[in-house]
Image (cartoon, coloured by chain):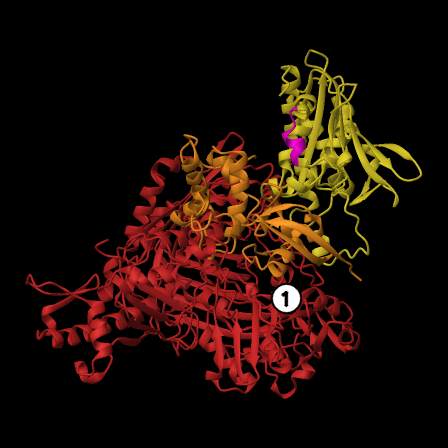
């Protein structure tokens, strides 16, 4: 809508799908995860006890999105399909290993979050497809997580942000980790090298600093009026370090918020 | 070319039926078709909050909605807050706390606050600040607005015991 | 009923219409057969216009007219300068619509008028303009090389130069034991009132009279100029100010649209409405604050300042607007601030670039000069190892030196004289309220991942004066009814209430008898306007004079009626009492009825009204202190303002509620301006900050706890009320105090702030650069 008001987008036809009630729902998946209709309002997800119970990372991401007036109307599918590189949900969906259901008259297909985001505001959705459902895997016990962002003001799109998941093996050793940054390029940036550095290690200060450096080196960022590319690279590393620290504490202390 | 649609909606308890262009925003519809000019436009891209109204009980940006999307909906605008001559506690509190200067942002704040207090009737100061962080004011510096909302909340019920001078929570 | 209305925190009577959504802002005005205008604005920063083809637009259904400069023909004039008309600036005035050349993104080229704004914008889309691009000049340095000229005929991009010389700066620098030179820069930002500009113009074909709604700030002057442009007698134009969504200095100055819309209304014979959208506002309404300063200070080793030498560069944008050279000149004018600096030399440069033109924004030039000077003083304090507070106290002008003549610091003007003040007292009060002694230990301390710093800034601010007069008329009506008509405008400050308070106390009637009317050129025929925080000073004083005179007249008439000498009577709370007697009072409304009915009292003249003008070209000076406590995360550059204080002496307070409101509002605007706001241009002249997603305004979660303390220690001797203006003091010191605080916080990292804004990106860059310097 802002793009239309600014006359930057002039579609000939708009189809209002807001009334497709069937696409708005939050239900429990058999595997312990969630199935969320694309048209589910962000505010509903924010308030959902089931989401809080089954996916604390997703629940924590919601209040970071804009302001409550925006979340009253904004939908999860809308945010994902819009694919603003500075948005929280795309990165969270990548970290969670979510899957998206795309439906057209021809067929229905399932795309992994990681393959869904192509570039700035560009996704794998074909012109005749509609994103209908988001499938989120079950939460494993002992997961630590954190989401954080730097924005100029509360509710702004992030200059740089990170979402992490960490799993320990019951002791202090990291078994698995997922790290995705947002606000740092056209799409959420998974950090496989950093993730590799975490596996099988304890998260001590030295490792954390190495990982931060690795993230900063690996990031391919842009400059805009709010932050330079260098700032995003640097602070991406800092945020990742801080987020991993928190996630690790959570995992080892067995906290599930 | 744009097409026209007939829409029916209720605004402040009154029912309207109008023929509108599909591309007309809800804000423009309220202001120019229904002459309810209390809802203001400060940016037309959903950031300033001056256009906030209630749609089916939820606070929304009317500049980001098309009028046709409000077909069948119930709207509440600032003109519907007072009951006849009886001002709503929020309106009274804004006046008492000098929570307005030029008055242009005021309807948006009132509607945001109204929606917020309906959901959280006993907020802390930090919660109020957070709730209104999507509304811009250039004149007052926000502090009297926060105080006014807390005052209205306490008049309608019990308010939190947290002191009014508690600084806002910053995330980082 | 209060003893005195003046000084009481009376709630505003204006509020009712705003809290019920019944305010009438210009876009709320709907007239029969009203058409809507939209303006085609240049997408290029610097280009020749080869052709403009409006045929397609004119032919569209629903479009009434499309016009360019050509259709304005012989009427066309440039937008005039009103103030600070430095010689040379007249070469850079803005045409009403571009014809041969465009010089900034946003420059108006054509106007389309249609049945709705939607259709008018559709029409703009089909206007075809052919451009020949020219190289863009995007900063002062490049502009001054004069390799690419914005105005070929002028031969230069250096619009004007103005020099100030007080004392003997050269000698002072020769003798100085300490000298330091720095280059400072304040960033381009502006006021952004929440309501954008707008106009509704209606030309009555039968009476040949023009009515314009949406004008504000300078109704009388604007009317005079537009009347002259349209070749109509002034009194045939009615400029009506309705409710206004803030101004901050931006709104109300004459822009091309103020000529174009009335012109269109006259030609079409139908009302024409134009409402600016936010994107337009960011690229068309006045920009401000982008001032650079090469500053040098000379002092003794004990910290006594001997002299200042400065070169000031104002990035004026592509055209000189109504304010002429005001912003850079005002930067120079109060650069010495509240300090005893007997030698001051300054050269002001007004430089043209391919950006939107510059005009006043709340405390124009003062925010900037306060930043330059207070930063320099802190640097000096650090170099000489003197406590920054001690340094201020050492150099502040003492109360016994006041009135203090600074010297001639404004072009073609009388000397700057600080009229009244106790500067040390305000500083001591500020330190006490802030608990500075306790917090001092936090300077530079690293705690929980953040560095802490406390910054100080002292300011003086001119208020009142400038244009010489304002007027007020008081009329007593039937029943308990008193009307006050004032010549100034209301942009949200609460004059309807404050003026009623002044009238109530002076005249001697209950406040609820009084209604205040403003913003109509028919009501008070002569006046200047609301700017430089002069409203209460000038118009309040005029009102005081009118009310006082009217009271005397009423007492004289009452005296005749009662057979008593007027001096034995007094008017209180609407009743006339005989002093020292138990005689029952005469109700004023009874007196009024008598006067209106009878021809015998006072030779049949209805002495029930009085008009007065207050005249003063002298400025009063409010003053005060800003203190800021910040915490900075060195890894992310994120800054939190933990606590903020403004202490301001305004001489006398009419309504403390309003004064505190102004101070806190101004402080938040200044904090936002210093930390968040910036108008950013690309290298090829595109304005990158055209929405509120890019131009960031402070919101409720960006606001620290702010305390404002208002002092009345030094009333002004220059007006009968003793007031000084209170609208700007809250913003003046924000850049300086925050910059000083950040420098204190990051001192151990070697960071010394010389530029604004204080964004996380820049803070990180400063830290990065410093650590690179050290390791190399």
Query: Which residue, as the protein is rendered here, is positioned at the far right?
Result: A106
Q: Is residue B63 left or right of residue A219?
A: left
- Chain painted in yellow in the figure: A
Q: Is residue C199 visible?
A: yes
Front residue of A102/C470: it is A102
Depicted A101 relative to depicted B83: above or below: above
Front residue of C263/A113: it is C263
Helix, strand or loop at label 1? It is loop
Question: Is residue A47 in the magenta section?
Answer: yes
Question: Is residue C101 in the magenta section?
Answer: no
Considering the whole magenta stretch, tell me its main secondary structure.
Answer: helix
Q: Position of residue B157 (x, y in %)?
A: 43, 33
Magenta segment boundaries in residue numbering: A43-49
Depicted A255 relative to depicted C616: above or below: above
What's the residue at 32%, 49% (across, down)?
C427
What's the residue at 83%, 36% (across, down)?
A116
Residue denoted by label 1: C355
Q: Residues within 10 Å of mark 1 (few under 14, many from 20)?
A: many
Q: Colour of chain C?
A: red
Query: Which residue, as the protein is rendered here, is positioned at the far top?
Result: A170
Q: Is residue A73 left or right of residue C639?
A: right
Q: Colour of chain B?
A: orange
Q: Is residue C375 visible?
A: no
Which chain letter goes with mark 1? Answer: C
**Quarter assignment of residue A29:** top right
Front residue of A45/C448: it is A45
């Amino acid at each position: 809508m802002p793009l239309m008001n600014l006359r930057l987008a002039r579609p000939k036809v708009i189809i209002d799908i807001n009334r497709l009630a069937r696409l708005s729902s939050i239900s429990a998946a058999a595997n312990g995860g969630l199935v969320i209709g694309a048209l589910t309002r962000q505010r509903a997800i924010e308030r959902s006890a089931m989401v809080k119970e089954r996916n604390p990372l997703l629940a924590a991401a919601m209040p970071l999105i804009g302001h409550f007036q925006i979340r009253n109307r904004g939908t999860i599918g809308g945010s994902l399909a819009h694919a603003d590189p500075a948005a929280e949900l795309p990165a969270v969906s990548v970290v969670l290993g979510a899957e998206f259901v795309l439906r057209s008259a021809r067929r229905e297909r399932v795309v992994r979050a990681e393959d869904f985001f192509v570039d700035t505001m560009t996704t794998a959705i074909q012109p005749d497809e509609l994103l209908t459902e988001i499938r989120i895997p079950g939460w494993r016990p002992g997961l630590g997580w954190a989401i954080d962002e730097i924005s100029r003001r509360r509710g702004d799109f992030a200059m740089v942000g990170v979402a992490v998941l960490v799993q320990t093996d019951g002791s202090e050793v990291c078994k698995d980790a997922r790290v995705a940054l947002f606000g740092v390029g056209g799409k959420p940036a998974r950090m496989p090298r950093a993730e590799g550095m975490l596996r099988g290690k304890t998260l001590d200060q030295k490792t954390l600093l190495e990982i931060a450096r690795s993230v900063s080196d690996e990031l391919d960022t842009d400059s805009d009026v709010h932050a330079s590319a260098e700032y995003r690279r640097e602070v991406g590393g800092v945020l990742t370090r801080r987020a991993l620290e928190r996630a690790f504490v959570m995992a080892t202390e067995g906290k599930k918020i | 070319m744009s097409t026209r649609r007939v829409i029916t909606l209720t605004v402040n308890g009154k029912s309207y039926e109008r023929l509108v262009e599909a591309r007309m925003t809800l804000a423009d519809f309220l202001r120019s078709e229904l002459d309810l000019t209390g809802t203001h436009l400060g940016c037309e891209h959903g950031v300033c909050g001056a256009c906030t109204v209630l749609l089916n009980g939820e606070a929304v940006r009317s500049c980001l909605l098309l009028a046709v999307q409000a077909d069948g909906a119930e709207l509440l605008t600032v003109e519907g807050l007072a009951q006849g001559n009886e001002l709503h506690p929020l309106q009274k509190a804004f006046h008492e706390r000098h929570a307005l200067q030029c008055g242009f942002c005021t309807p948006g704040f009132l509607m945001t606050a109204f929606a917020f207090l309906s959901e959280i009737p006993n907020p802390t100061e930090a919660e109020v600040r957070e709730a209104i962080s999507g509304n811009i004011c250039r004149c007052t510096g926000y502090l009297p607005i926060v105080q006014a909302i807390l005052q209205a909340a306490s008049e309608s019920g019990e308010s939190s015991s947290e002191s009014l001078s508690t600084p806002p929570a910053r995330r980082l | 009923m209060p003893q005195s209305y003046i000084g009481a925190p009376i709630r505003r009577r204006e509020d009712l219409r705003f809290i019920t959504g019944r305010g009438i802002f210009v876009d709320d005005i709907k007239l029969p057969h009203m058409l809507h205008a939209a303006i085609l604005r240049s997408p290029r920063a610097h280009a020749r216009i080869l052709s403009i083809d409006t045929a397609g637009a004119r032919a569209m259904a629903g479009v009434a007219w499309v016009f360019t400069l050509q259709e304005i023909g012989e009427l066309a004039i440039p937008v005039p300068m009103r103030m600070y008309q430095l010689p040379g600036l007249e070469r850079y005035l803005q045409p009403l619509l571009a014809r041969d050349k465009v010089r900034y993104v946003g420059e108006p080229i054509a106007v389309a008028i249609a049945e709705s704004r939607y259709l008018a914008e559709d029409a703009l889309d089909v206007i075809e303009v052919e451009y020949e691009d020219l190289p863009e000049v995007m900063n002062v340095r490049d502009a001054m090389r004069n390799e690419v000229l914005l105005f070929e005929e002028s031969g230069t991009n250096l619009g004007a130069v103005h020099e100030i010389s007080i004392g003997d700066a050269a000698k002072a620098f020769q003798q100085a034991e300490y000298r330091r030179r720095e280059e400072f820069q304040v960033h381009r930002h502006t006021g952004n009132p929440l309501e954008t500009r707008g106009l509704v113009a209606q030309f009555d074909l039968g009476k040949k009279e023009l009515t314009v709604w949406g004008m504000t700030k300078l109704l009388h002057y604007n009317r005079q100029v537009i009347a002259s442009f349209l070749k109509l007698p002034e009194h045939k134009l009615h400029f009506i100010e309705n409710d206004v969504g803030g101004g901050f200095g931006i709104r109300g100055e004459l822009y091309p649209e103020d000529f174009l819309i009335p012109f269109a209304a006259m030609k079409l014979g139908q009302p024409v409405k134009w409402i600016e959208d936010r994107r337009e506002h960011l690229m068309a309404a006045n920009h401000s604050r982008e001032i650079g300063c090469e500053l040098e200070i000379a002092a003794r080793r004990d910290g006594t300042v001997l002299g200042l030498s400065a070169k000031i560069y104002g990035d004026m944008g592509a055209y000189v607007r109504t304010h002429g050279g005001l912003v850079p000149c005002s930067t120079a004018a109060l650069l010495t601030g509240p300090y005893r600096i007997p030698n001051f030399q300054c050269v002001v440069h007004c430089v043209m670039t391919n950006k939107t033109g510059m005009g006043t924004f709340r405390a124009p030039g003062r925010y900037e000069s306060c930043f330059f000077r207070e930063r320099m003083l802190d640097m000096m304090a650090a170099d000489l190892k003197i406590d920054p507070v001690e340094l201020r106290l050492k150099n502040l002008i003492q109360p016994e030196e006041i009135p203090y003549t600074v010297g001639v610091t404004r072009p073609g003007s009388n000397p700057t004289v600080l009229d009244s003040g106790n500067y040390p007292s305000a500083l001591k009060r500020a330190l006490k309220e802030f608990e500075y002694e306790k917090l001092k230990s936090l300077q530079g301390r690293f705690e929980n991942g953040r560095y802490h710093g406390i910054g100080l800034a002292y300011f003086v601010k001119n208020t009142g004066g400038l244009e010489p007069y304002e007027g007020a008329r008081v009329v007593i009506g039937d029943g308990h009814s008193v009307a006050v008509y004032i010549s100034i405008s209301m942009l949200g400050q609460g004059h309807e209430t404050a003026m009623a308070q002044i009238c109530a106390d002076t005249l001697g009637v209950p406040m609820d008898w009084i209604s205040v009317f403003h913003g109509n050129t028919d009501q008070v025929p002569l006046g200047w306007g609301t700017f430089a925080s002069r409203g209460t000073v000038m118009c309040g004083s005029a009102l005081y004079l009118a009310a006082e005179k009217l009271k005397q007249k009423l007492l004289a008439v009452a005296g005749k009626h009662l057979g008593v000498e007027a001096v034995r009577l007094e008017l209180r709370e609407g009743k006339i009492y005989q002093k020292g007697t138990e005689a029952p009072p005469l109700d004023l409304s009874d007196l009024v009825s008598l006067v209106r009915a009878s021809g015998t009292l006072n030779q049949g003249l209805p002495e029930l009204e009085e008009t007065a003008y207050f005249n003063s070209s002298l400025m009063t000076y409010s003053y005060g202190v800003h203190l800021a406590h910040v915490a900075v995360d060195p890894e992310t550059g994120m800054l939190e303002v933990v606590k903020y204080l403004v202490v301001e002496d305004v001489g006398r307070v009419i309504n403390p509620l309003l004064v505190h409101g102004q101070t806190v509002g101004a402080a938040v605007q200044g904090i936002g301006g210093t930390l968040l706001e910036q108008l950013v241009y690309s290298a090829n002249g595109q304005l990158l900050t055209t929405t509120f997603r890019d131009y960031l305004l402070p919101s409720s979660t960006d606001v620290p706890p702010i305390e404002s303390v208002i002092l009345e220690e030094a009333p002004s001797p220059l007006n009968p009320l003793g007031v000084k203006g209170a609208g700007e003091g809250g913003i003046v010191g924000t850049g300086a105090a925050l910059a000083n605080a950040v420098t204190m916080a990051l001192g151990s990292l070697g960071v010394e702030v010389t530029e604004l804004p204080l964004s996380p990106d820049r803070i990180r860059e400063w830290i990065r650069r410093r650590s690179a310097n050290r390791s190399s």
